[in-house]
Image (cartoon, rainbow, N blue to C red):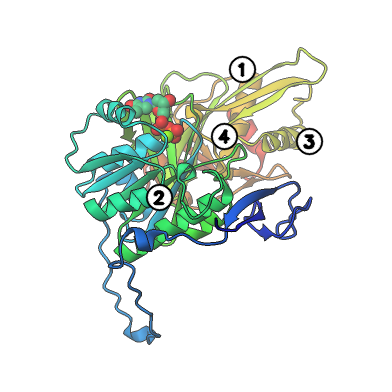
Amino acid sequence: MAKIKTTWFCQNCGAQHARWQGQCTTCKEWNTLVEEVVQKEKKPSWDAASGDTLSRKRTPQPQLISEIDVTETPRLDTTNAEFNRVLGGGLVPGSVTLLGGEPGIGKSTLLLQVCLNLPYKTLYVSGEESAQQIKMRADRIKQNATNCYILTETKTQNIFRQITEMEPEVLIIDSIQTLQTEIIESTAGSVSQIRECTSELIKFAKETNTPVLLIGHITKDGNIAGPKILEHMVDSVLQFEGDRNHTYRILRALKNRFGSTHEIGIYEMLGHGLREVINPSEILISQRGNSLSGTAIAATMEGMRPLMIEVQALVSTAVYGTPQRSATGYNLKRLNMILAVLEKRAGFKLGQKDVFLNITGGITVDDPAIDLAVVAAILSSNFDIELSSQHCYSAEVGLGGEIRPVSRMEQRVNEAAKLGFEKVFIAPAKQKFKEVGTDVQAFSKIEDLVKYLFS
Ligand code: TYD
Ligand code: MG
């Protein structure tokens, strides 16, 4: 019997400690140490499972930077335009990509769909669902794949044995938390298991030049479950997000060693899988034409893409002593700030009103350019005067009630013009937007905009 050793791992940062203590000395988090059983004597991992052929090590030699071959390795086209875009142009051979997201958001669906469409020999390893369940999902997605193999297995050693036999060109793991390696005896999903399984897979990817896609669970505060170290180990981290009750999903790169992290992919979850949304702005604006009080359209940016988003506000007399403030898809603190600015700088008494704010489509917006549309929607609901559905707004609002410019104004204005908006309200800018085909109106103070819109 090999001697069993236990160590304490911080669940937050992955730091190893010799004994239990209340606070992790590395990341200063409290109550995060968990005991893990680590067997001292290491059983072989990927090397032995695959025979000696692949593990013969090349020792890297120092190279002159000017002599390094830069002929770029061709990327594998995933035939999914949005997925390619987020990856930075396709899958890089030998890269390890981690896809995180809340349960039920569609991670398995996305990767299965990508996998079914791939023109390469693909192995989809699932530790979560049975082969029948996956087949049923594949039938819903309705793609007749000829290159896709399914394996339901959680032991990495067995997975590598299958891999050596079938030699897939792309490997997908659903999910990293269900994998288990024989080297470590702790349960699947523990920090040490996740770390060890990931490093085995990374080793496999680098040595065979096979791209590996991992699905990872996220915890309730939105981090990928397991140590933060997991995100450092892989080449790219993608996040699949959206509101489960809505159909839109956004794929975002949080880290990408082979491309920009500014790109996003937009999908719509339909009965037959995920549809790529090529022109998102047109869909997110629900009913152009019949204007309603309390609705304003914002020209925002999601990553590098302009996105027109509808903001809805409802202002009504408070029934309780403390008025309610609620925001969906928008930061509540920021809403409170905007209400305070309206009260202090523009003299609107909203202190006794309930204010509800909603971003349609279940999308969460961080872009400060949405502020002006929030202001317009709130005031429109407050006065019960509808705003023209041909107008849109794009500017940040400051604490002094000033309207501030935002980045990439030209792109936003162009998008508005493309979608046929007649007027865009912005902050005073040095740029000229003469030829864009839409009227651009700049205001420097909230009061001036209010006067213009509601009098
Ligand atoms: P799933 O990929 O299982 O989520 P995850 O792997 O992130 O946990 O997606 C599950 C949800 O997607 C489920 O609630 C049903 C929905 N869905 C559709 O709406 N249409 C489809 O074609 C498929 C396959 C799933
Ligand atoms: Mg799943």
Q: Earlier in the sequence, mark 3 or mark 2?
A: 2
> Would residue 260 be visible to someone looking at this image?
no
Q: Residues within 10 Å of mark 2 (few under 14, many from 20)?
A: many
Residue type marked 4 = Ala
Q: Residues within 10 Å of mark 4 (few under 14, many from 20)?
A: many
Residue 105 percent location from the top left of the image: 45, 32
Residue at the disc numbered 2: 156
Residue 318 image-quadrant placement: top right
Residue type marked 2 = Thr
Query: Is 443 left or right of 135, judged from the image as shown?
Result: right
Residue at the disc numbered 1: 384
Residue at the disc numbered 3: 344
Q: CA distance from mark 4 to mark 2?
A: 51 Å
Q: Secondary structure at mark 4?
A: helix
Q: Who is closer to the viewer here, 176 or 371?
A: 176
Q: Which mark is residue 373?
A: 4
Q: Earlier in the sequence, mark 4 or mark 1?
A: 4
Q: Secondary structure at mark 3?
A: helix
Q: Earlier in the sequence, mark 4 or mark 2?
A: 2
Q: CA distance from mark 1 to mark 2?
A: 62 Å
Q: CA distance from mark 3 to mark 2?
A: 62 Å
